[in-house]
Amino acid sequence: MTRRLVAVLAAVLALLVTSHPAAVAADDPAADRVVIVGIPGLVWTDVTEDGTPELWSAAASGSIGALTVRAARSVTCVLDGWVTLGAGNRARFIIPPAPEDAVPEVVPPDTGVPRAEENLDGCLPQESGVNLSAVVAALEEFPDLVDDNSYGALPGSLGAAVQCATGVGQGPVLALKRAGARTELVAIAPSDAAGWTGLVSQCPVTVVSMPELVAAVDRGAALARLDDQLAMLRSGLPPETELIVVGSSETGLNNSSLHVAIDVGPGVAPGYLTSASTGRAPFVQLIDVAPTALDRLGIDAPSAMVGQPLQPGQPRPESLTEAIAELIDANVAARAQGSLTSTFFLMLVVLTGALCPLCLLALRHGGSKLRAVVRLVTFVVATLPVATFLANLVPWWRAGRPVLLLAILVAAAMSLISVLALAGPWRGRRFAPELVVVTVTFATLAGDVLLLGSRLQLNSLLGYNPIVAGRFIGFGNIPFGIYAASALLVTTAVVRAAPARRERVVLVIAAVAVVAVDGAPGLGSDFGGVLALVPAYGVFAIVLLQLRPSAARFGLAGLAGAVVVIGIAALDYLRPEEEQTHLGRFIGQLLDGSASSIVQRKAESNIGILLHSPLSLLIPVFVATLWWLLRRGGQLHGLLAQREWRAGLAAVAVAEVIGLLVNDSGIAVPVAAGWLLVPLALSVAAADRRDADPRVARAVGPDPRTEGVTVNSRDSAGPAD
């Protein structure tokens, strides 16, 4: 057994060192100049061989990606996009209240464009009508026009990082303008190739606005106009110039999408794009654009830029038509999932919130038939979380009626798991059907990050969305909550089945494997998850070995979590910068002092969600339900007399509480665990009453299903130090 333990530890160490985001190593492109073209609202359905031949040509000769434009608020309007692009970090454009005679008028009253304060918390949804000189004057007099919203952004960082920069149009003012930056602003674009050559040659960075799609009535005509302008610009580019074309923002307040990203120039191989900020081709972010420009020019990005350079040349289909179709499909999937999540979460909150008290009443006052109904209903509900992930094995968003197909897939997965668990050869063993559900859940989530690159979590009902851009790979908060609960319950079952002399070794192997899958860069990549799981396994060991509880022991368990997560992050930090995940980059942010803003933002986000999310309503419901079942005299009180279950349940509680505290939307962690754990607890309670108070067990008599089975009794030992 010792040899096996050493082998497992060695394999895990190798996993931590070698795991990395799925990206193809390539020579870093370099350029003498970088031209960035921002086209608000441009999506991949706009790019066609006949309608936009220049965009098509650029896409064919360069690398392409699905761009998320997420800034410092949920919908990125035009001016938010420009501020974020230049900051290399999420920012937003605001107009603080001030006397009319003190603030230059940004939107002339005769343009017909609504005043800023009437639109999206002071953000102009349209670029047309913005007076260039007025915006410049406003920026100089009131630098608070741009706001980082706790992301630590420094607007205009791109302009300040280079010798000089040229802005063509109105939006680039916000991307380049900053005190001390040498920025030349040109209101009117050149009308011929020679003009573009002269203009682009002046500075190493040129940012160009093409706002033709903003408020366009005839989108086809607007696309033709901007494509002609792009053709003229490309024909005038000096040699060794890299061109980056991005759909820099949304153009409506209710129409979030993935946008166009094209990178073409010297050393840029055709393919898909990715970046270390996403770790997943073909997804990139708007915050990656400024760091890319500096990287190509051989300039170190300032610490306030959290985006990462674009990595071109990732594998894509040989046919450009097929490649663009995949990018369009990625947007369709993200939009389909985004349109469903609010309704789904509301239904789930109502369903589980009502189910718990109703089931408790049925268990307390109902007869055997009603208990059988409770058992079946709660058992099936417990399969819902894993079914939402398994449904993503089929591209449901491509169907003519995607909601219907998704509902059918989820229902089918729930039915199959329920039948497998309730009708299998283990059906006569107590807890066995519930453990089958737990094991299937754990295996699905672990297999997803180990084998499928988190494919099941991306755009799933309980997963994450690339438009929201909170995460692109690994474990999100909701999947982690489910993963942690299922992993600890599976560990409990495995430890309980192991011989007494080997339970410690089994526990260590399980803990190392579970933590490694969760925390390894490129797999789970979950900083907060490791902080929660390591102390949880520490508490598991304390209770299992019946050590005397003390503040020192619990403190050591928490310290172990911090040490492990810092160790994983340090290993990640030692890898090349383009291969690092957010774990390694956090070490760099600690070293340069920029990590404080990240910690502050996550704490503020966590508190805000805790106070305002409907998910918070489920916490007291779940806690009350579990307390009622586990209390003295409750149907599951007998579990607490069994050392392994006592240890496992304590570990689950610790993992979920710490997960709540250390993540930016931490409330999702214990709620997600409750969606699995609470229905299963109700199911066990409804199955029979032999795990209740010992007096109840004696009254009921022995379980005929376990008669003749040797029970592993290891609870006779008293507490030890």
Image (cartoon, grey):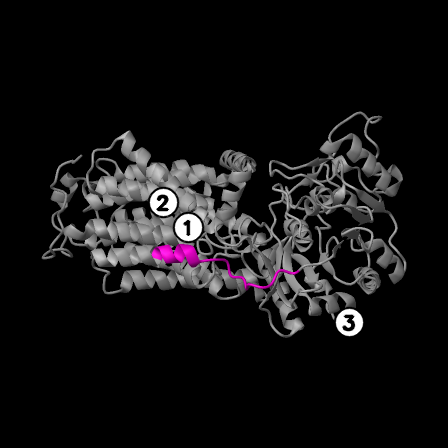
Disc 1 or disc 2, which is closer to the eye?
1
Give the vertical position of 448 relative to 664 (above or below).
below
- Give left or right: position of 383 versus 422: right
- Say which quadrant the C terminus sits in: top left
Q: In this figure, which residue is indicated by the disc labeled 2?
A: 533
Mark toward the start of the polypeptide (1 vs 3): 3
Give the image location of residue 536, x and y in percent.
32, 42
At label 2, the amino acid type is Leu
Give percent across and percent down for residue 568. Answer: 42, 48
* Number of numbered discs visible in the structure rendering: 3
Kind of element beneath mark 3: loop
- The residues colored magenta run 12-29
Question: Which label belongs to residue 519?
Answer: 1
* Mark pair 1, 2: CA separation: 10 Å
- From the viewer's perspective, is the residue at label 2 or at label 3 nearer? 2
Magenta stretch, overall SS: loop
Left or right placement of residue 471 versus residue 222 in this view: left
Which of the two discs, 1 and 3, sits closer to the camera?
1
Are dots 1 and 2 in contact, CB under 8 Å? yes
Circle 1/circle 3 CB separation < 8 Å = no
Mark 2 and mark 3: Cα distance apart in space:
54 Å
Q: Which mark is residue 50?
A: 3
Amino acid tagged 3: Asp
Residue 358 seen anywhere in this rendered image of the structure = no
Query: Residue 683 in the image: x percent, y percent?
Result: 30, 50
